[in-house]
Amino acid sequence: MSDTITVTIAPELDRVRILATTPTHDVLKAVLGPVRAAHPRAAATLLEGIALWHQRPLSVVLSAGASDDGSALGLCDALGFGRTLHYEVAVAMTEGRGRRRRRDVRGLGDFRDLRQLALWEVTR
């Protein structure tokens, strides 16, 4: 029960991908609609719900690039800090990483790029 849950969020123009993992397994994989269509508190409420469900705070890695809608999620302040009782946010700059767009017809995809971002340590 003490495994840290890391939630990696990758907002893109037409969708938001979310991967929640512990060191031993995946907790959640999701592909949601674009940020512009979501309620302003949707991301924070989702993270709070996951933290409450698992009864522990989350480490959140927010992927941020030039074309992303990361700031629109409302998880960080203007200086890039985001911390609540339920989660702490670290921003991973992903500009120039050459992300590839791939749609996997068999499911949600392998989330390989989000697994790499999950390695970012959120300092407490």
Image: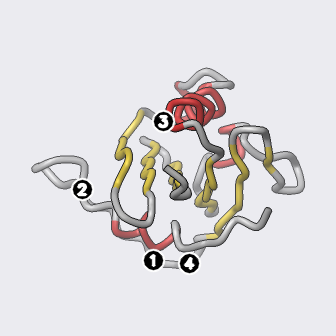
Q: Callout 2, which amino acid?
A: Gly
| Residue tagged 3 | 34
| Residue tagged 1 | 98
Asked whether the beta carbons under mark 1 and mark 2 sit within 8 Å of each other, the answer is: no
The residue at the far left in this view is 106
**Few, some or many C-alpha atoms within 10 Å of disc 2 (few <14, some 14-19, many ≥20)?**
few
Q: Callout 3, which amino acid?
A: Pro
Q: Which numbered disc, 3 or 1, marks the residue that appears first in the sequence?
A: 3
| Residue tagged 4 | 96
Q: Secondary structure at mark 4?
A: loop
Residue at position x 43%, y 42% in the image: 15
Q: x, y (%) of residue 64?
A: 63, 60
In front: 47, or 93? 47
> From the viewer's perspective, is 29 left or right of 35?
left
Quarter occupied by the C terminus: bottom right
Q: Callout 1, which amino acid?
A: Gly
- The span from disc 4 to disc 1 (Cα, nearest Å) is 5 Å
The residue at the far right in this view is 79
Instruction: Give the label on residue 19, or none.
Output: none
In front: 4, or 17? 4
Residue at position x 37%, y 44% in the image: 28
- The span from disc 4 to disc 3 (Cα, nearest Å) is 22 Å
Is residue 94 visible to the viewer in this orientation of the structure? yes
Asked whether the beta carbons under mark 2 and mark 4 sit within 8 Å of each other, the answer is: no
**Few, some or many C-alpha atoms within 10 Å of disc 3 (few <14, some 14-19, many ≥20)?**
some
- Viewer-nearest of labels 3 and 2? 2
Give above or below for 50 relative to 23: above
